[in-house]
Amino acid sequence: MRRKYKRGWSWKAFLLSVFWYFYHGIIDKAIVMAAIIIFSFGLGIIPVAIYSGLNGNKDLYNKAMQNF
């Protein structure tokens, strides 16, 4: 049985991006995002924040389904 997840924008994921992913245990994506921000000298923070806002809920749902 597939559960529904909250679709759409996540303000918490947008504002906290890398920290939100670490907090929810999505470590692999958090490390990639942190690397993008570091290696782009901080310019990657805006695309990372937008990605997090758009896909945070979906990524959290996928993680929950893997653990289920």
Image (cartoon, grey):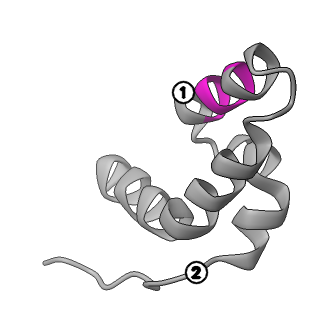
Q: Which mark is residue 53?
A: none
Q: Are marks 1 and 2 in contact (CB under 8 Å)?
A: no
**Relative to residue 53, is residue 37 depicted above or below?**
above
Report whether residue 62 is seen. yes
Q: Which residue is mark 2?
A: 9
- Toward which corner of the image does residue 64 lie, by quadrant? bottom left
- Toward which corner of the image does residue 56 lie, by quadrant? bottom right
Q: Nearer the viewer, mark 1 or mark 2?
A: 2
Estimate the x, y position of residue 1 in percent, counting from the top left.
13, 78
Query: Magenta stretch: residue 29 in it?
Result: no
- Secondary structure mostly seen in magenta is helix
- Asked whether 23 or 1 is in front, the reply is 23
- Toward which corner of the image does residue 2 lie, by quadrant? bottom left
Stretch in magenta: 30-35
Which residue corresponds to the image point at 31% horizontal and 48% vertical from the top-left? Answer: 66
Estimate the x, y position of residue 40 in percent, counting from the top left.
75, 21
Which residue corresponds to the image point at 75% horizontal and 51% vertical from the top-left? Answer: 46
- Mark positioned earlier in the residue sequence (1 or 2): 2
Estimate the x, y position of residue 41 in percent, counting from the top left.
85, 21
| Image mark count | 2
Q: Amino acid at mark 2?
A: Trp
